Amino acid sequence: MHPNTQFHWQDREAMADFIGALGFGMVFAETPHGPRVAHVPAILEEGRLLFHLAKGNALSKHLDGQSALFLFNGPDAYVSPDWYGEPDQVPTWNYVSVELEGPVSTLSRDELVAQIDGLSATQEARFDKTPWTRAKMRDGLFEKMLGGIAGFALEPKAWRGTTKLGQNKSAEAISSAADAIEVNGRPAIAHWMRNLST
């Protein structure tokens, strides 16, 4: 989380919506071989963050019972000082992110299947097509593939959100920078800057 409290994001419901919209993040944890990270899809259900990893992943055999950090990165962009339209500015980077920290436990087989089904159903609902389900797989293949992954649940004890969007600047400077950022190919972060209340 950014040290400037102006950029702290406290709205858990909005952060949960942000996590749901992204559906993909990074889990960090300590292992006997040093810190490791894995990039994984995840879904929030009943207050827990559910995800799965390949059993061969360097984190898989070290997560159960350990505290971990899960990071969701949203849009970001470099901000040129010239874009504020005000003197004596410096370069910076605007971004949106949410960190969840807490203990991790292993999912049962049934919980893992439910996590996969829930994750795919959530993502498939975004498309204008008949949703994919496990029923489309040939008999026995899902069970075979299931043996290669491990499911986990992180119980968030800490939520840390950051919306660094120029809140320490004037409304005119934010608008000017957002316009320049959008012109330079980063419309998502420009949208966040124009809608600071979200």
Image (cartoon, helix red, strand yellow):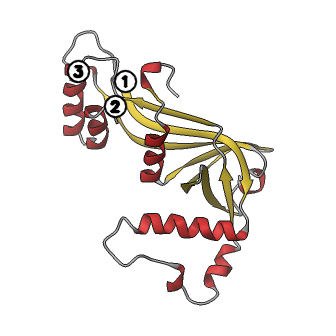
The image quadrant that residue 58 belongs to is bottom right
Q: Which is more N-terminal, label 3 or label 1? A: 1
What's the residue at 49%, 25% (across, down)? 2
Mark 2 or 3: the one toward you: 3
On screen, residue 85 versus residue 37, left or right, reads left
Going from N to C along the chain, the mark reached first, 2 or 3, is: 2
Numbered label attached to residue 152: none
- Tell me what residue is drawn at x 39 percent, y 67 percent: 125
Q: Residue at x 64, y 87 (%)?
A: 140
Could you say which is closer to the camera, residue 125 or residue 72? Answer: 125
* Alpha carbon distance from label 2 to label 1: 6 Å
Give neighbour class at mark 2: few <14, some 14-19, many 20+ (Cα, 10 Å).
Answer: few
Return the residue at label 3. Answer: 171
Picture residue at 23% right of the left edge, 21% below the top: 171
Left or right side of 27 for 16 = left
* Amino acid type at mark 1: Thr
Quarter assignment of residue 173: top left
Instruction: Classify mark 3: helix, strand or loop.
Output: helix
Q: Is residue 177 above or below residue 56?
A: above
The residue at which mark 2 appears reads as: 78
Q: Amino acid at mark 2?
A: Tyr
- Residue 92, disc: 1
Relative to 128, residue 95 above or below: above
Give yes or no for contact between labels 1 and 3 (Cβ–Cβ under 8 Å): no
Q: Is residue 153 left or right of residue 138?
A: right
Judge from the rendering whether residue 139 lies leftward or rightward of residue 177; answer left or right.
right
